[in-house]
Structures are given as structure tokens and as C-alpha cells.
Amino acid sequence: MAARFNASRGAIREAFSQLEQLGIIAVLPGGALVKAQKSASISVLGPLVARGVSPDLVLERQFLQTFGSLAAQNAREVLACADAAQMNCIREMVVNLDRENGGFSVAIPR
């Protein structure tokens, strides 16, 4: 691989390591095995989108559901712990996001 791509062995090892972390390959003694697309981790979405590749719609939906659930839980925890000054800061951030992103609604308790 190093000779074929005119790269150092370290660069090839790093590339294999990143592909393995994404769940795209399994590194085995003497080479690597390409894994089924279904077994790739959700972190493969970022590199695919950056390259302009449209990932599987089921994978996208699963990512958005997972991310949405995590974001909602984090928001609930932040709101539960925020004092008055922090709540005002959060309100300002939401208003600024609303201006920048064309309008969305979020109910923040007072």
C-alpha cells in the first residue's frame, strides 16, 4: 500500500486505523477485510457528507434520531441546572440562532 500510494508506512497504518474506527474495515494480520456497510459506525457519516456522498437513508435517520435524543437530554440537564443569568444567556443564544437560521421555535421555561 505504501508503494502503491507513494506514502509512508506510518500514514498507511494511520489510514487503516481511522477506517477501522469508522467500522469500514477490520485490520487483520497481513491485511484488512472490508466490512459490510451495515456494520459501519455512525461516525462514518461526517466523512461521507464531506465528500459529497449520500449515505444510506436508514443510517441518516438513525443518526438524526440518536443525535436528537442526546441533544434534547443535554438541553434538559442544562435548563434544570441553569441559574437566572445563565437562562438569560441561553435565551439570547436561541434568539440569535433564530435570526441566523430563518426561524424556528423553542419554548424555554421562564
Image (cartoon, rainbow, N blue to C red):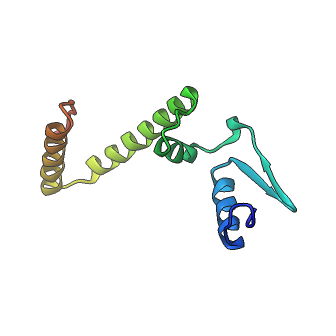
Residue 59's quadrant in the figure? top right
Q: How many marks?
A: 0
Which quadrant would the N terminus be assigned to in this image? bottom right
Residue at x 18%, y 32% (from the top left corner): 102
Nearer the observer, 48 or 90: 48
Which quadrant would the C terminus be assigned to in this image? top left
Where is residue 55 shown, x and y percent of the image? 55, 33
Residue at x 21%, y 30% (from the top left corner): 104
Nearer the observer, 110 or 103: 103
Question: Is there any visible trace of residue 110 in the rendered image?
Answer: no
* 62 left or right of 99 in image: right
Where is residue 57 shown, x and y percent of the image? 54, 27
Residue at x 17%, y 40% (from the top left corner): 100
Where is residue 63 shown, x and y percent of the image? 51, 37
Q: Furthest residue to the right?
A: 30
Residue 76's quadrant in the figure? top left
Residue at x 75%, y 43% (from the top left corner): 35
Question: Is there any visible trace of residue 109 in the rendered image?
Answer: yes
* 24 left or right of 98 in image: right
Residue 91's quadrant in the figure? top left
Nearer the observer, 57 or 64: 57
Q: Furthest residue to the top?
A: 57
Placement of 9 over or under 57, stated as above or below = below
Placement of 100 over or under 14, stated as above or below = above
Nearer the observer, 4 or 47: 4
* 5 left or right of 72 in image: right
